Image (spheres, rainbow, N blue to C red):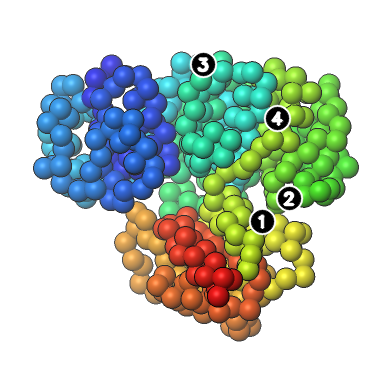
Amino acid sequence: MNKAAIFFVGIGGIGMSGVAQYFLSQGHAVAGYDRVLTPLTQRLVSLGAHISDVDAPTAIPTLFRDPKNTKVVYTPAIPANSPLLTYFKDKGFVLEKRAAVIGEISHTMPCLAVAGTHGKTTTSALLTHLLRSCGKKITAFLGGIAANIDSNFLLEGDDFMVVEADEFDRSFMHLNPTALALTSMDADHLDIYGTASELSKTFDDFAQKVPAEKRFIANGLAVEGNTFGIEVGTHSVHNLRIAEGSYVFDFVTPTVRISNIALPYPGAHNVMNAAAALALALEAGCEPTQLKVGLSTFKGVDRRFSIRLTAPKVVVDDYAHHPTEINAVADALEAFYPDQIKLGVFQPHLFSRTRDFAAGFKQALARFDQVLLLDIYPARELPMEGITSALLIDADHGATQLVNKGMLPEMIAKSSATVVAIMGAGDIAFEVPAVMQILKNQQDA
């Protein structure tokens, strides 16, 4: 990219903010818009970006008004009728999707990509941490805040680029990976793909970008390559058990065995994520002894089974927004808090996803003893007639209530549940501090 100035429409998104950090580090002038200003946008401002929450051409700084020296990067999450997008299109600016920009960067260094409808963020964060533990100098674009680096972006060198291969809008087809992991292919984004089979076909098309021996595929998926799994696959986990709050296992490949490796991170699904990351790290030339040390010091990813409070109630904050992900949270809670009353708090994300997976959501949420449902977070969508959170109420599960966000802290405090899982990909995370405060006040009273 040879433009001196770059304007990001939707700069506060977890993926967009990482790209903005990259170009700030390369000396570009950066500005952008997002409707909500957050710690991510504050970090960008501290690095020199100019950011506004006003979706209007009047908010564009003078430096970014000349189409000859400004490129515009946007995310499909921004509505097509955005006044800013309309202005840039009408004035003849070069507009490029975030995915295409990430794709351009991926051509400049060896790229390790992590794909899948679930597990991308944790697996790519694990891989980033493992590569750093082995002394690799990497650039990483992550879809969450990795605790070990306290960021969604890392720039330490060009030995490897680690990137989440996002299937939304077929974004990952812009990438140029040298090796990849594929964690899952559950139906999702049917507003884009139409059918689950078309989604699976696109994942397979993406996998074909690298030779079969450079692919690491979750066992059972219909994509050719090395396979990883628990007690199965070419790269497999054996002797899995829980000891002192960690998963402990042996990791076995055709050429390597790493015994008694420990993952201090809840959730059996994260063992699969660790297997994918270990396989890619070995492919990148990491030494087994360094990987063993590295995995044991992994601190997790923000909002991926993040334990925010342990008393008077356990409060878990998680990005789960698909039935499979809610089931993974329920599995982890059952494993670590087997005899406690569990409350699931869920904010559905997208009207289309709520419609497409209503039955799956009802089944997953019914695993909690009590359920609180918030209104659907619309994101990029307009309301759909008849599609509301009430669709997710299971008539046979009497302990389900529809609530508004203002009621949430008090409802959680009054609940008899001792374990609370707050789940969703919308703005529900902003309610967690108020929940923690009321529970702390309750404990101190």
Is residue 423 shown left or right of residue 273? left
Q: Which one is earlier in the sequence, the residue at label 1 or at label 3?
A: 3
Is residue 133 in view from this perspective? yes
Residue type marked 2: Ala
> Going from the N terminus, do you reach mark 2 or mark 1 first?
2
Mark number, residue 435: none
Give the image location of residue 239, x and y in percent.
88, 42
> Circles 2 and 1: CB distance less than 8 Å?
yes
Q: Nearer the viewer, mark 4 or mark 1?
A: 4
Alpha carbon separation for disc pair 2 and 4 = 19 Å
Task: Out of 153 and 441, give the one closest to the viewer.
Answer: 441
Give the SS element for disc 3: loop
Of circles 1 and 3, which is in front?
3
Residue 268 lies left or right of residue 16; in this view the side is right
Splitting the image into 4 quarters, where does residue 87 fall? Answer: top left
Residue 362: % across, % down: 59, 71
Q: For residue 158, which numbered disc appears in the image?
A: 3
**Mark 2, residue position:** 268
Alpha-carbon span between mark 1 and mark 3: 34 Å
Depth check: 112 or 13 in front? 13
Mark 3 / mark 2, whichever is N-terminal: 3
Q: Earlier in the sequence, mark 2 or mark 4?
A: 2
Q: Position of residue 57 (x, y in %)?
A: 13, 42
Q: Which residue is mark 1?
A: 328
Alpha carbon separation for disc pair 3 and 2: 32 Å
* Spot occupied by residue 269 in the image (x, y as percentages of width and height): 70, 48
